[in-house]
Amino acid sequence: MTQNADLRARHVAAIPRGLASAFPVYARHAENAEIWDADGKRYIDFAGGIAVLNTGHRHPKVMAAVRDQLDHFTHTAFQILPYEPYVALCERLNGLAPFTAPAKSVLFSTGAEAVENAIKIARAHTGRPGVIAFSGGFHGRTTLTMALTGKVVPYKVKFGVAPPAIYHLPFPAETHGVTVADTLKALETLFRADISPSDVAAIIIEPVQGEGGFLPAPTELLQALRMTCDTHGIVLIADEVQTGFARTGKMFGIEHSGVEPDLVTVAKSLAGGFPLSGVIGRAGIMDAAEPGGLGGTYAGSPMACAAALAVLDVIDEEDLLNRANAIGETIRKSLENMALRSDCLAITAIRGPGAMIAFDIVTPEGEPDAAATRRVIQTALEDGLVLLSCGIHGNTIRVLNPLTIADTVLLEGLEKLGLALAAAK
């Protein structure tokens, strides 16, 4: 029996099936954009822990910062004895905030925690209960964030009805036949039929939908939402959990639109693989919660804060904003060439800003082909390339390699992707 097979047997016996793993491959070691499994096989990582590793696996500067923090202390609970790394990181995040007003930040551990607390802050600020999200959006798996998430399978199955005062609008996307005008008309209908805007605390949106299929939010929509929020005193929340920290070629995805949000949720690549999240917001809104209303035992872990400060240094020192754009251009050109090949599966709708690139696999008739997408991912895995799918039809492949990936490794991974598209035809 291989090490992977042995670990899989232990996994099935010890862990509930509700926690699904994409592949029966168990990581043993990783460096930058490469992973070695329990049996010693090498993989090129085009998943990045679901967009967590923009600065790669085990970046030396991040590792050094964590080791230094370990020599001081691992935990005090910031609500009991605060510490400088938390304060320093919030200062850095405030300086990066994608809006012009004075900012404050608060830290947590997971993206879902960040989203939940952003909603709490918006409700405290407005005194209202309602929240508007979008179909296809993903905001987490807790009871509240699951309700905000705009996809039933697998996130909501068997978990009962959603909390009250949560509403969804259709997300505009050409591939789904939904326009910005359709979305705005649905918003008008919602305000007339289901909830008054005076009862809405927040509108939350991903600048680029992640699980929904790497669909960029049109600037026209974001501008209209900003105007609506300003008119009715609603808080606009940009969920940057997947788009943040250089992935799109900007520090935050919403910066491509020029629209300023009120609150920003962050997580994933913030701390280079260590669990850390946060909410960055306009100071006047952030101070709405009463003392003790925000926090968490492990929120803003000292090691994670140290890692995050190093991550922000790496993004700056290694110019990862421009690197993301360069990587994205390489990926896009490679995919465009694959789309022209007669020996590959049909791919279409190559999209996404910076290095947040995705494409759809379709039948010869142009219909979504989820079965072929699964074949591509499995074939790629067997050849040593880790890929992820997404999208409401399960036929989108997203590329989330570290921004620190070596050019030779990037090209090798793209070659493997092309081979998988051909082999799965």
Image: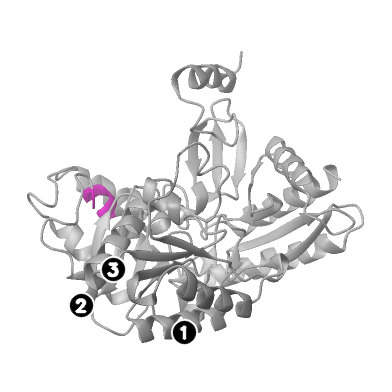
* Residue 303 on the magenta segment: yes
Q: Residue at x 35, y 50 (%)?
A: 110
Q: Is residue 394 left or right of residue 198?
A: right
Query: In the rendered image, which residue does mark 3 sit on?
Result: 128
| First along the sequence among labels 3 and 1 | 3
**Residue 305 position (above or below residue 18):** below
Bounds of the magenta span? 299-306
**Residue 241 position (above or below residue 41):** below
The outermost residue toward the left is 81
- SS type, badge 3: loop
Q: Amino acid at mark 1?
A: Gly
Q: Residues within 10 Å of mark 1 (few under 14, many from 20)?
A: few
Query: In the rendered image, which residue does mark 2 sit on?
Result: 284
Point out residue 71 in the picture as x, y percentages from the top left corner. 17, 43
| First along the sequence among labels 3 and 2 | 3
Of 284 and 81, the residue lying toward us:
284
| First along the sequence among labels 2 and 1 | 1
